[in-house]
Image (cartoon, rainbow, N blue to C red):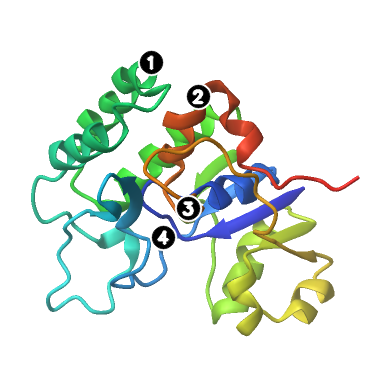
Amino acid sequence: MRISIIQSCYIPWKGFFDLIGQCDEYVIYDRMQFVKRHWHNRNRIKTANGVEWLTIPVITKGRFDQPIDEVLIEKSWAEKHWRALELAYRRAPFFEALAPLVRGWYERADKETHLTAVNELFTREIASLLGLRTNIVRDMAYPADGAKTERLLAIAAAAGARRYLSGPSARAYLDEALFAAAGIATDWMSYDGYPEYPQLHGSFEHALSVLDVLFNTGPEAPRFIVPQTMD
């Protein structure tokens, strides 16, 4: 059983779904600290005026150490984000077909008070649309204490994992020896080799919300969230 344990992001990029799609289980790691100007509450879309951020307004004043799963949304935001998406992608080939579905996600998300609930909603719905079969659970499902590696290991062990797929940024702190001693092999994710696809608004940009892939490629989207293989 292969597991990934990652903090949630708002409408994540294609690499996020590539990673969790390679696992049997994805654990939403939102008991970790919220980081301002990170991907937790924002992501990028491509517009006629260039790449722009969509940011969910959250309450951070006096709450510098709060975990992601305690972050509260400050004010209404969903309609503004949907209008920005509509303006940016209304000429995309599959916008009209997907608009009712995606707008419905935003209508549901607008009723949530916590950031983690919004992120979970979008992650589950997008994963389903992409045909991913990965089991998605919250980190509260597993007991976990200790420092970074120890906490990740505790979750992986409690889940019964035998392999742990990590993002490349964790190389700075992850102790593979601890995982190996527990009988869990560590695999490292690579985000190289993603194919380009027809994209609106100028030169191609990879680092965008996966909604860009969906609106531009529709049912072909799963083909563009995995790297090209070399024969």
Quadrant of the image occupied by residue 51: bottom left
Is residue 139 in sight in this rendering?
yes
Tell me the quarter of the image containing the C terminus.
Answer: top right
Tell me the residue that label 1 is attached to: 97
Measure how far apart labels 4 and 1 are at the Cα level.
Answer: 32 Å
Q: Residue at x 55, y 56 (%)?
A: 142
Tell me the residue that label 3 is attached to: 205
Give 212 or 113, whichever is nearer the viewer: 212
**Could you tell me which secondary element the residue under label 3 belongs to?**
loop
Q: Which percent across, then down, holds residue 112?
A: 21, 41
**Could you tell me which secondary element the residue under label 4 belongs to?**
loop
Measure how far apart labels 2 and 1 are at the Cα level.
Answer: 8 Å
Q: Tell me if label 4 and label 1 are in contact, CB under 8 Å.
A: no
Measure how far apart labels 2 and 4 are at the Cα level.
Answer: 30 Å
**Could you tell me which secondary element the residue under label 1 belongs to?**
helix
Q: Amino acid at mark 2?
A: Gly
Is residue 111 in sight in this rendering?
no
88 to 101, vertically: above or below: below
Give 196 or 133, whichever is nearer the viewer: 196
Tell me the residue that label 4 is attached to: 30
**Could you tell me which secondary element the residue under label 2 belongs to?**
helix
Tell me the residue that label 2 is attached to: 218
Left or right: 48 as drawn, with respect to 229: left
